[in-house]
Image (cartoon, helix red, strand yellow):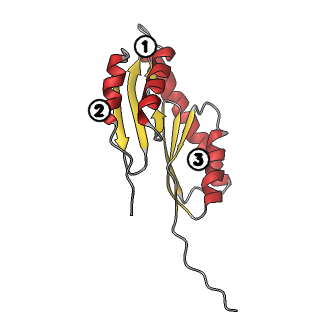
Amino acid sequence: MNIKSPDVKTDIENALSQAGVNDVSVAQDRDKGVITLSGNVLTQEDKQKADYVTKSVSGAAVVSNQIGVRPEGFENEAKSIDTNIDAAIAREFETALTAKNFDADVKYTVNNGVLTLNGDVNSQNKRHDVEKLAASIANVQQVVNQLQVKEQRATSTTT
């Protein structure tokens, strides 16, 4: 039986609006228990406010804060910098995955410093090791670990 997270998307959108945080989109994956925030705000404080408001409403869900900070008058420059940083994170993480032989099982995306891990691994230890590796990459602001541990086969012991 698969238990889904409660639907809180509308509640979060309303709370963000009441807090004066605009231009932020909310997506919810109820199966994985992840709320994703995206869009652009003017200041780091607005990004932090969106994160705080979302966490206060979302309960136990993981909040993936992929909001970009785009200061007024410097929107293009900020976007270009974030794009370059994301590309550098992806290159460094790919190299690290390959060095540890994790590259076959792990898929990932990078958006505004958020490194999201997907795929199937064969153990809880490997899931943890990949998350730890991701967190060690320069300029990663958040790791969202959506790796699934493959169902293990039954074992038998003859006595």
Left/right placement of residue 15 relative to residue 139 reads left
Indicate the amino acid at tag 1: Leu
Indicate the amino acid at tag 2: Thr
Query: For this rendering, which residue is in front, 157 or 76?
Result: 157
Quarter of the rendering containing residue 134: top right
Q: Mark 1 points at which residue?
A: 42
Quadrant showing the C terminus = bottom right
Total numbered badges shown on the rendered structure: 3
Seen at 45% across and 11% down, the residue is: 71
How far across and how far down the image is residue 12, in percent? 35, 30
Quadrant showing the N terminus = bottom left
Residue that lies at the very extreme toward the top in this rendered image: 73
Q: Mark 2 points at which residue?
A: 10
Q: Earlier in the sequence, mark 2 or mark 3?
A: 2
Seen at 56% across and 79% down, the residue is: 154
Q: Mark 3 points at which residue?
A: 94
Whole-angstrom CA distance, mark 3 to mark 1, is 31 Å
Indicate the amino acid at tag 3: Glu
